[in-house]
Amino acid sequence: MSNKKLDQYKRWRNKTVSFRMSPEENELLNSYVRMSGMEKQEYLIQRALEKPITVIASPKIYYSLKKELELLVAELQNTENTHPDTLDRIEFLTNIIKEILNSKEI
């Protein structure tokens, strides 16, 4: 059993929610989590509650985005028909890059 944790609003997070995914769906989710720079739990909560995903520029994020771009380029070079999930990942990645470029924190 995991330890209880307080969230940023000093609420106990002691309820467990779980669901099953295919290996492909899991890899896609992991890709989105890596690009966001968030913990998987926080990412899933934000998405489930339809709250915006805010990516804060950092060296870790730059490295994750670079690796994700390399994976996408390799995938596009090796396939004739691009999988719809790949296009979704490209759109998500493009939006993150636009936000970082428009950010005043850089």
Image (cartoon, rainbow, N blue to C red):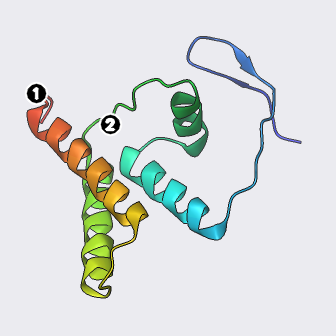
Q: Where residue 104 is drawn, which disc sits there?
A: 1
Residue 44: x and y in percent read 58, 38
The answer to whether 85 appears left or right of 73 in the picture is right
Q: Earlier in the sequence, mark 1 or mark 2?
A: 2
Most extreme residue toward the right is 1
> Quadrant location of the C terminus?
top left
83 or 65: nearer the viewer: 83
Label 2 crowding class (10 Å Cα cut-off): few <14, some 14-19, many 20+?
some
Q: With 101 as the anchor, is 96 left or right in this view?
A: right
Q: Is residue 30 above or below residue 69?
A: above
Amino acid at the residue labelled 2: Val
- Kindly identify the amino acid type of the residue bearing the numbered disc 1: Lys
Could you say where residue 96 lies in the image, as x and y percent from the top left? Answer: 25, 43
Check disc 2 and report its element: helix, strand or loop.
loop
Q: Residue at x 75, y 54 (%)?
A: 20
- Residue that extends furthest to the front in the rendered view of this protein: 81
Q: Is residue 57 left or right of residue 4?
A: left
Q: Which mark is residue 55?
A: 2
Instruction: Residue 92 in the image: state x and y as whole percent.
Output: 31, 48
Q: How packed is label 1: few (under 14 Cα within 10 Å), some, or many (20 or more)?
A: few
- The residue at the point 27 percent across, 51 percent down is 91
Please determine whether, in this image, residue 37 is positioned above or below residue 84: above
C-alpha separation, residue under disc 1 versus residue under disc 2: 13 Å
Q: Position of residue 52 (x, y in %)?
A: 40, 26
Q: Residue drawn 10% across and 40% down?
A: 101
